[in-house]
Image: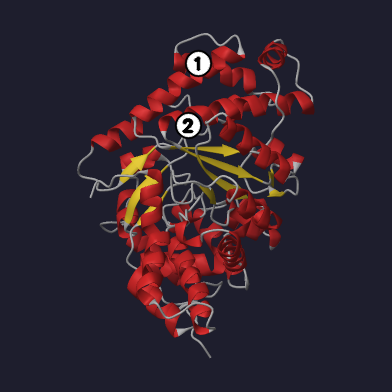
Amino acid sequence: MKAFLDKEFLLNTEAAKKLYHEAAEKQPIIDYHCHLNPREIWEDVRYENITQVWLGGDHYKWRLMRSAGVPEKYVTGDASDREKFDKYAEVLGKSIGNPLYHWSHLELRRFFGYEGILNKDTAGEVWELANAKLQSEGYSARGLIMMSNVDTICTTDDPADTLEWHEKLAADKTFPVTVLPAWRPDKAMNLEKTTWPEYIAQLEKAAGMKIASFADLKNALHKRLDFFAAHGCKLSDHGLNYVMYAPADEAEVEKIFRERVEGKLPDAEAEAKFKCAFMMAMAAEYRERGWVMQLHYGCRRDNNPVTFRTMGPDTGFDCVDNTAPSTQTAAFLGALEDKGKLPKTILYSLNTNDNAAIDTILGCFQNDEAVGKIQHGSAWWFNDHFDGMVEQLKSLASLGYLAGFVGMLTDSRSFLSYPRHEYFRRILCRVFGEWVEAGFYPEDYDTLKEIVADISYRNAKQYFGFESKK
């Protein structure tokens, strides 16, 4: 019987153990996509208790609790922090097979030194232990980051953001972690949203110009891109229903823009044409600057209208979508390539059925501009569990060049999420170890360790062009 979460957790072969402990374990972390708040990093916030740092804003945990029938009062409602923690502990104790069971216990061990099991019977002792640790030296936001051996963080930032906290962090020589903004212009693109006119007014103020046309919108975004570049930004991120390719001439796009300004909501065809024009323009800007374009798609968001009205977006009511036409993804990238405007790009689909399509599309646009110029992004959101990570790794290895993969990210709002990188690295070494022991790959440990270290850290550093403060 193998012990739970011991030193060799997930490492089921001698080869896997050797690769993890000698090549992966001590590599720094590059978290090139997350949702941490840069203001909290600058202010070096501290938390009164584990609920605040662990459950606040974590819709993974919220979904799990709701599935177990926990009333919303104990999820996002007005119950006390202790009551919310107790409910989560009770639910987690029975969450066999859910990645939260592994993540939560890894976090308790790595940050708080708790070697036991969290459930309804141990909730009290974990609450006391974790809260005492949180009040001790080194358990602030920055301390948790440094405890995790983080090299670089990229937050997710709107074009209208002032980036004041990034500016302060860049000037702070006492904090050895690079914190950079990442450009997320979804609000400028999503003209079908009722809030779009209000957002355009915010963007006008940030860019210092009137936006009365699509050409004006592109000019305003160009100004803001320059502003982000001056603050060290090297990558964008887009949340799409799917990668749209619906080309239209400039006059038609201007007409769609004008009608929206006048109050007419676009139909599906007009929306697709506008978003395609928007993404083509943005991609050309990224290519000019040497930035990386990240495309996250395959998610249907805010499915429960009742909770959306009362709680708003990003509260745990999203699901996998099956609308991701590979023909349009390939056509979009092809149109950019034809114009000489295709930047380094990372494709993430929330639907694992898209793995093979992504991995074959990659091969159509690779060249010597970069190792893995077009990337298959790490198993994302509902897929960053054991099976999802294994499927993504094996698909990329079978159809592409796994050795050039830029590896894991947290995609998290919590400062305690960094053990997800450990989880990923252990799974990576497990896959490699199984291939070695099955005779699929030789015991060439020099090469294997180089690949593991590259995927764990070095590939991302080179691909994005990050420079360490350390």
Kindly report which numbered mark, 1 or 2, lies closer to the viewer in this rendering. Answer: 2
- How many discs mark residues in the rendered view? 2
Q: Which residue does the image show at 57% across and 35% down from the upper left?
A: 337
- Give above or below for 358 relative to 90: above
Picture coordinates of residue 171, whole percent (x, y) = 24, 35
Q: Which residue is mark 2?
A: 286
Of residues 195 and 136, the one nearer the viewer is 195
Residue positioned 35% across, 48% down in the render: 152
User: Hey, which residue is sitting farthest bottom in the picture?
Assistant: 1
Residue 127 on image: x %, y %: 44, 65
305 above or below 13?
above
Residue drawn at x 24%, y 48% is 176
C-alpha distance separating marks 1 and 2? 14 Å
Residue 16 x, y percent position in the rendering: 45, 78
Q: Earlier in the sequence, mark 1 or mark 2?
A: 1
Disc assigned to residue 219:
1
| Residue 14 falls left or right of residue 173 | right
Q: Quadrant of residue 50?
A: bottom left
Considering every residue shown, the one lying at the far left of the view is 173
Q: Disc 1 residue type? A: Asn
User: Which residue is more in the foreground, 440 or 294?
Assistant: 440
Give the SS element for disc 1: helix
The secondary structure type at the circle numbered 2 is helix
Locate residue 335: give its quadrant. Answer: top right
- Say above or below: 53 vs 158: below
| Circle 1 crowding by C-alpha within 10 Å: few under 14, some 14–19, many from 20 | some
Q: Position of residue 96 (x, y in %)?
A: 62, 73
Q: Quick one: label 2, few (<14), some, or many (20+) residues within 10 Å?
A: many
